[in-house]
Image: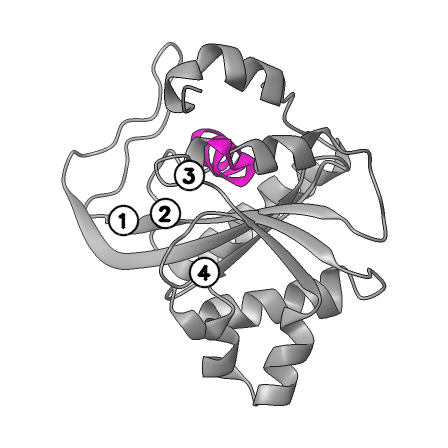
């Protein structure tokens, strides 16, 4: 935990950017009947019945110190999907960085071994050497600011019925553009000093 909190306190360094990474799922839901349009004094109304159209996965990249994020919509969240996200991160998002400091949880696919599932060993090693991974502790995913950003995405963009992946990609991209243009970020205040006081029960006694 303290390792995560310490990197959050470190000053901005464009050669070693700090990026938080997480993922979430969106159920694709369509209408069985056309909604009733808005009227004066009455909002648009939807039928309670709906059609399920499967799910899509959303990978979230979030650099809190610059207020930049990128949400990638995929069909699945396999090891190969994760590996391609990491390649995109080091080759396209931060091609000139010495390393990318990556905060994420311990999900079973969030391993450097996933790179070897998707790429030749030499390519997997090249990508791995560009990453400095910092895992949040077990039951400590709340320390990952990308999880906060996913919650913002959910409340601002995904709290309604979206029927298909194409529409989801379009809606998420529009949300991302607005958030990046305003450089919206997380006002993180929880520090190592706070942890040692408020979570002292988790520390060993000497």
Answer with mark 1 or mark 2, whichever residue precedes in sequence: 1
Mark 2–mark 4 Cα distance, whole angstroms, equals: 28 Å
- Is residue 88 part of the magenta span, yes or no? no
Determine if residue 191 is in view.
Answer: no
Task: Name the disc covering residue 158, or none.
Answer: 3
Of the pair 114 and 53, the residue shown nearer to us:
114
Residue at image location 84% in from the left, 44% down from the top: 13
Q: Are marks 1 and 2 in contact (CB under 8 Å)?
A: yes
Please tell me whether the stretch drawn in magenta is mainly helix, strand or loop: helix
The residue carrying mark 2 is 162
Instruction: Return the disc, 2 or 4, that comes first in the chain's sequence.
Output: 4
Q: Which residue is drawn at the image coordinates 54% and 53% (left, top)? A: 170
- Disc 1 packing (10 Å; few <14; some 14–19; many ≥20): some
Mark 1 vs mark 3: which is more N-terminal? 1
Q: Which residue is mark 4?
A: 110
Q: Residue at x 41, y 24 (%)?
A: 204
Q: CA distance from mark 1 to mark 3?
A: 11 Å
Question: Secondary structure beneath disc 4?
Answer: loop
Task: Tell me how far mark 2 sits from mark 3, CA to CA.
Answer: 8 Å
Q: Which residue is mark 1?
A: 29
């Amino acid at each position: 935990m303290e390792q995560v909190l310490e990197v959050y306190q470190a000053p901005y360094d464009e050669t070693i950017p700090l990026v938080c990474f997480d993922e979430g799922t969106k159920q694709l839901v369509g209408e069985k009947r056309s909604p009733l349009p808005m009227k004066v004094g009455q909002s648009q109304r939807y039928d309670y019945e709906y059609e399920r159209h499967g799910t899509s996965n959303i990978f979230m990249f979030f650099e809190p110190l610059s207020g930049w994020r990128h949400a990638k919509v995929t069909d699945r969240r396999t090891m190969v999907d994760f590996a391609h996200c990491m390649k995109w991160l080091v080759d396209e998002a931060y091609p000139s960085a010495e390393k990318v400091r990556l905060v994420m949880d311990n999900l079973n696919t969030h391993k450097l071994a996933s790179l070897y599932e998707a790429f030749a060993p030499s390519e997997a090693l090249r990508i791995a050497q560009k990453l400095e991974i910092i895992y949040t502790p077990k039951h400590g995913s709340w320390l990952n600011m990308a999880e906060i950003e996913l919650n913002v995405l959910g409340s601002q963009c995904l709290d309604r019925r979206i029927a298909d992946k194409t529409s989801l990609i379009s809606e998420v991209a529009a949300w991302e553009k607005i958030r990046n243009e305003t450089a919206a970020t997380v006002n993180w205040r929880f520090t190592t000093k706070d942890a040692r006081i408020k979570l002292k029960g988790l520390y060993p006694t000497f």
